[in-house]
Image (spheres, rainbow, N blue to C red):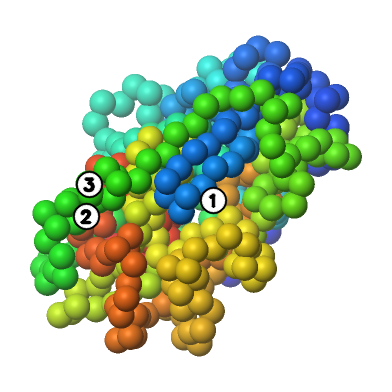
Amino acid sequence: MEYLKSWIKNQKKKNKIYIKRKSLDNLENWKISKKKLSHSTNKFFQIIGIRVSSNFNKKKWDQPIMVQNENGILGIIRRKFNKEYKYLLQAKVEPGNINHLQLSPTVQATKSNYKRFHGGEKTQFLNFFLKKKKFVIKSKQSEQGFRYLNKFNTNYLVEIKRYIPLPSRFRWFSKLELIYLLKQRNLINMDTLSVFSCSIQKENKEKLIHTNKEIKNWFQKLNRKYKISYKKIHLKDIKNWKIKNNIFENINKRHFSVIGLNIKSNCREVKKWEQPIIAGKKGFAGFIVKKYNGTNHYLCRFILKPGLKGGNISCSANFSDLKDFKNNNNIPPYEKKIIKYFFNKKKKLYNNVHSDEGGRFYHTQINRMVVEADKKLDNKLDPRFIWVSHNQFLSLVKKRMVDIEARILFTCYNFNKTL
């Protein structure tokens, strides 16, 4: 592990990125209008406004949201070395990374990037995912539903048997090394964890609290009962948001903001560029777990998000701003009971801080936590919650019913079971 620490330290010295804040209305190749914020090529992404209406918690609100109608590639290559699998990751700098450099998948690219609309260099190792026909894992999954509108990426795990030369910022990592690095703050990239979330192995035998049919009926009932809809609106018409000091933000400084960046780097396909980026708060994602006849179960909940079609299954607690809980901001009583459960627990089965993807999100951290249930928890549990076993959770992931926050937290807790 000392050699591993030394390698990461050396990568930080070699791979540089320089960031300056810049006015949204003065970003090179970007235009902000009354309608939207977009690139001059109409590629990459746009930021528009939406007006949301839902009978879930009886809410109506306006917000900006990112539109990127491209299916990105998140791909990891693995290879066997002396009967042990290792995974090819890259030390990648992103403008939004809180520590500049994190360990990313072999390929992490939107279509606009790998088609080189930015005029930069080729994406390395791309052909392993575009031209190969057989994959260990190929799974299309949703992204953040409160900040992206209908955004999906395809997660790949591909196996090779031959030697390939590596650029200096790429390295083969063993599972043991990755488990160690997962304990560090803000080091393993969110997209790396997303790929591994699609590769977790099932348990051999399970004793179930709810049958698969009961979970299906629970989900379908809630999906019929609760609805969410939106209509696109102009940026200038978004209520409770304003541009102040060149930042587009909520008037109560909640949720997130949109800022502009000027970026220079010595290790990206493009050496300098400018872009808007979503600046988030410190969020929270937590699972409550319990054993039932020796089988791990996870307390999941039904959730609706404006950027996803229909209902999704999420972790026990998930919110974008920890201060919302501390300030008691619009948190329903049934959720408050669950959230308090995490902060009243002294023993944490898992507790660490990781970042959202730094290409689109700026310094956005999530405190991920897993705690154990006690016998009192099931008393008056809201019907929007349900206990789901390990294997049932994996089946729901395969059906694309689980949101990204729950997938990644589940992976952090079960990383030793990845393929």
Q: Earlier in the sequence, mark 1 or mark 2?
A: 1
Q: Which mark is residue 220?
A: 3
* Residue 209, x across and y down, in percent: 16, 70
Could you say where residue 171 lies in the image, as x and y percent from the top left? 51, 48
| Three-letter amino acid code of the residue under disc 2 | Trp
CA–CA distance in space, label 2 to label 3: 6 Å
Residue pointed to by mark 1: 189
Apparent side of residue 41 relative to residue 381 in the rendered image (left or right):
right
- Residue 325: mark in rendering: none
Q: Is residue 388 above or below residue 296?
A: above
Q: Which residue is mark 2?
A: 218
Crowding at mark 2 (Cα within 10 Å: few <14, some 14-19, many 20+): some
Looking at the rendered structure, the secondary structure element under dot 3 is helix
- Spatial separation of the CA atoms under disc 1 and disc 2: 33 Å
At numbered mark 1, what does the secondary structure look like: helix, strand or loop? loop
Residue 205 seen by the camera: yes
Residue at image coords 44%, 34%: 229
Height in image: 237 above or below 415? above
Left or right of 148 on screen, residue 46: right
Q: Are the residues flagged by discs 2 and 3 in contact, CB closer than 8 Å? A: yes
Labels 3 & 1 near each other (Cβ < 8 A): no
